[in-house]
Amino acid sequence: MKKKILLVEDDLILVDLYEATLEMEGFQVLKATSGKEGLKILKKDTPDLILLDILMPEMNGFEFLKELKKIKTVKNVPVLLLTNLGESKLDINRELAFALGIEGYLIKSKNPPEQVVSRIKNVLETVGSL
């Protein structure tokens, strides 16, 4: 059975890129282009991991994480943040991100999709879901 990844990302080019890469690696991809859309998906489906952008319209990644923790069926799903923020800007919110339960974060410009897939596999192995 394929592992499900929920990709919450507002950049449609990146959505297509990550989706293609993840599907080639044997994952099923659920897509949301906003935090609100991602939460709707989570009320119907349970992914094995969530890839979450931080800067999005309507609801940012931190707001999404706070809402995620209120949904009993998915509150323990591992989350990897995807960001274009530089290290120094992320440092400001790193403590909050980890307090909200993320497994880690990836800077998009420094991690091509293949490295993102590798990190996903590592997280899934760590949580015993792979």
Image (cartoon, helix red, strand yellow):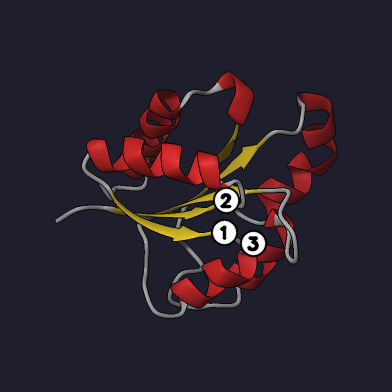
Name the residue type under label 3: Leu
Q: Which residue is mark 1?
A: 33
Which residue is at a point 48% across and 23% down the rendered structure image? 112
SS assignment at label 2: loop
Q: Is residue 93 above or below residue 43?
A: above
Please state the horizontal and vertical placement of residue 20, each as a whole percent of the image. 33, 39
* Image disc number at residue 65: 3
Which residue is at a point 39% across and 79% down the rendered structure image? 44
Q: Quadrant of the N terminus?
A: bottom left
Can residue 103 be seen from the camera position used here? no
Can residue 127 be seen from the camera position used here? yes
Q: Which residue is mark 2?
A: 9
- Label 1 – label 2 distance at C-alpha: 5 Å
Which residue is at a point 53% across and 40% down the rendered structure image? 13
SS assignment at label 3: helix
Query: Which quadrant holds residue 63?
Result: bottom right
SS assignment at label 1: loop
Q: Are marks 2 and 3 in contact (CB under 8 Å)?
A: no
Circle 2 packing at 10 Å, graded few (<14), some (14-19), many (20+), is many
Please state the horizontal and vertical placement of residue 121, each as a whole percent of the image. 33, 36
Left or right relative to 68: residue 21: left
Choose between 90 and 109: the one closer to the eye.
Answer: 109
- Label 2 – label 3 distance at C-alpha: 14 Å
Name the residue type under label 1: Thr
First-in-chain label (1 vs 2): 2
